[in-house]
Image (spheres, rainbow, N blue to C red):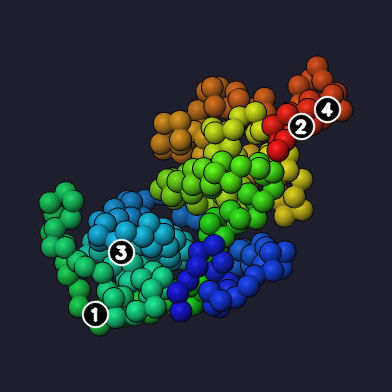
Amino acid sequence: MELDLENPLCSSHHHLPNHDDDSSSLFHNESAHLPSYFPAPDLFRRKTISLISHHSKSNSNPFLTYLAINYLDRFICLQNTQNWKPWTVNLVAVSCISLALKMTRTDSTSSVPNQDQDDEDGGSILVFDRKTIQRMELVILGALKWRMRSITPFSFITFFISLFNLKDPSSLKLLRDRATQIIFRSQMDESLMGFKPSTMAASSLLAACHELFPLQFPCFRNSICQSSYVDDKDSLMNCYGVMQETENGGGDGGRRTGSPVHMFDRRVWSTSSSETEMEAETKRQKICQLNFMD
């Protein structure tokens, strides 16, 4: 049955979700899809991601590549890949794509991706038969405890965007599309692997809002921070900062102390020492009244 990344716990597309119940279930279960240990960045992940992108380039669904890398990250966080043979990189890449295809398509016969003989750098790639791929799939499935309905940042976009009271549907779509783009890019940043999917969803929307609707940013930020589901505002702030830096050309996930991005972070995430909290809140309310009118 096809997996919907926005509603991964739904058993059918005909299911009519209860927004509150589904959101609560997603927040409650997201930690079960996260490993408790994140290894140091290594070449195994980078090479495997490169091969996943290479093998899935003919597929027009970017969510398939995202899901395959999600399986990869969850898998390698539970494995010691340092002593693995070089050819296993390609086998893991193909197997993760195969599993993602099985979860995103109802036609399981298309589960084995095309395996080009050469990678993008001109190097040769081993081609594996279906049985070999299936054996590696079982290894991955066992490590992930068969939890293949991954809860990803896309699962929380609808919830957090509902806190943004912008009236224009086209503006909301623009915000959603930009946040989605940021999520895709953030998957390549190894420094973001430790954040919960809900934190990444909220952070991507904050980054998109700051870029597209800067005047409404304080109101949207406060709405997210006041949500009962956001229990670690420091983590949210850190994730948002990394995403902003990546989008502004940081690229490596490193935090540059004193950069313009972080100077801005300090201003928007804390109240000025010359203002009382009440004065700051009054200003925020005025901004909301000006920018959220019909």
Residue in view at x 54 percent, y 52 percent: 194
Q: Nearer the viewer, residue 227 or 2?
A: 2
Amino acid at pointer 1? Arg
Residue in view at x 49 percent, y 77 percent: 146
For marks 3 and 1 on the same chain, the one whose residue lies earlier in the sequence: 3
Residue projecting furthest to the front = 294
Determine whether 24 is above or below 129 in the image: above
Q: Which mark is residue 93?
A: 3
Q: Quadrant of residue 18?
A: bottom right
Q: Does residue 239 appear anywhere in the picture? A: no
Q: Residues within 10 Å of mark 1 (few under 14, many from 20)?
A: few
Residue projecting furthest to the bottom = 131
Q: Nearer the viewer, residue 79 or 147?
A: 147
Q: Residues within 10 Å of mark 4 (few under 14, many from 20)?
A: few
Q: Which residue is mark 4?
A: 282
Q: Which residue is mark 1?
A: 130
For marks 4 and 3 on the same chain, the one whose residue lies earlier in the sequence: 3
Secondary element type, mark 3 = helix
For the residues labelled 3 and 1, say whether their Cβ atoms are less than 8 Å apart: no
Determine whether 218 is above or below 63 in the image: above
Which is in the foreground here, disc 2 or disc 3?
2
Amino acid at pointer 4? Thr
Secondary element type, mark 1 = helix
Residue 214 percent across, percent down from the top left: 61, 29
Determine whether 24 is above or below 1 in the image: above
For marks 1 and 4 on the same chain, the one whose residue lies earlier in the sequence: 1
Q: Nearer the viewer, residue 157 or 138?
A: 157
